[in-house]
Amino acid sequence: MDTLTGTLLAICVAAVLLLVAYKKGFLTNTGILASFISAVIIAYCGNFWWFAAYMLFPMMAFAATFTKIKKKKAMGLQEGKAGERGHMNILGVGLIPTIVSVVYFIDDGGASPYLTVAFLAAIAVSVADTTSSEIGVFDKDVWMITTLKKTEPGINGGISRLGLVSSAITSLVFAILSYALVFHCLDWRILIVWVCGMVGNLLDSVVGAVWENKGRISKYGNNIVTALSGAVIGFLLCLIVN
């Protein structure tokens, strides 16, 4: 599939998906705009299959977000007013994958497999983090990652068995599906994507406990830092092991 065809197809698919997201109240108006821009850049600078892999994230994220949304609202732990995401949420999870796609375009495929794994690893971090946060709030047993002392569900830096298990499962599912979409095969590098997702998720909790709770970084900044970490670790692991 050539670049123009892939980009036009991605625009059509993105428009349909974002229309559904708008109708369902999954995204704010600015969130839709930010999502569309990042999706088009990724489709053009990467290819249609990069775009398809990127689209797996919102599908999995919204599934986790709207799981028992009424209970989350009753607990005061929902995203936004009713689970919707805005442009800052999209920036937090989409900035690094978008930048990696631009680097891939500029590099003209010179480091193709490494940058592709870095791209998927960055998204895997967001998948693991979102699932851990959205599902983990239902676990009453939560520990602060830096002290291992009991804490409240939903607090920055809190980890739970339910959150860790759910994030491990969803990041593995994402790793398999996204890798198959982009590489059209399955091999050992799927494990790199999965491991990066889990490591980035734990790092998100550490950053949340150490800096976010003290107001030194926003949750969006935390998302960007940990996604970048996942991308860098994924790139280096792929480079070393290959």
Image (tube, rainbow, N blue to C red):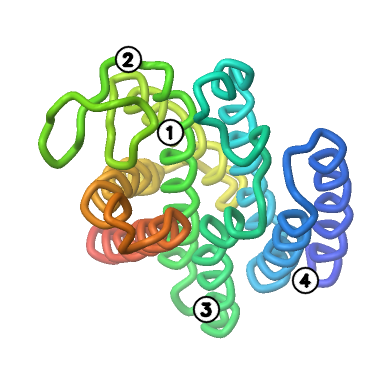
SS at mark 2? loop
Quadrant housing residue 36: bottom right
Say which of marks 3 and 2 sits in front. Answer: 2
Marks 3/2 in contact by CB < 8 Å: the verdict is: no
Count residues near mark 2 (Cα–Cα under 10 Å), then give few for <14, some for 14-19, many for 20+: some
- Front position among marks 3 and 1: 1
Question: Which residue is disc 1 drawn over?
Answer: 133
Observer-nearest of 90 and 184: 90
Among the two numbered marks 4 and 3 on one chain, the one whose residue lies closer to the N terminus: 4
At mark 3, the secondary structure is helix
Disc 1 on helix, strand or loop?
A: helix
Q: Is residue 11 above or below residue 174?
A: below
The residue tagged 4 is 3
Nearer-N-terminus badge (2/4)? 4
For disc 2, the marked residue is: 140
Q: Quadrant of residue 32?
A: bottom right
Three-letter amino acid code at the position of disc 4: Thr
Q: Quadrant of the N terminus?
A: bottom right
Q: Pointer 2 and pointer 4: residues touching (CB < 8 Å)?
A: no
* Crowdedness near tag 3: few (<14), some (14–19) or many (≥20) residues, C-alpha within 10 Å: some
Between marks 2 and 4, how big is the CA–CA gap? 49 Å
Q: Secondary structure at mark 4?
A: helix
Disc 2 marks a residue whose amino acid type is Lys
The amino acid pointed to by label 3 is: Val
Answer with mark 3 or mark 1, whichever residue precedes in sequence.
3
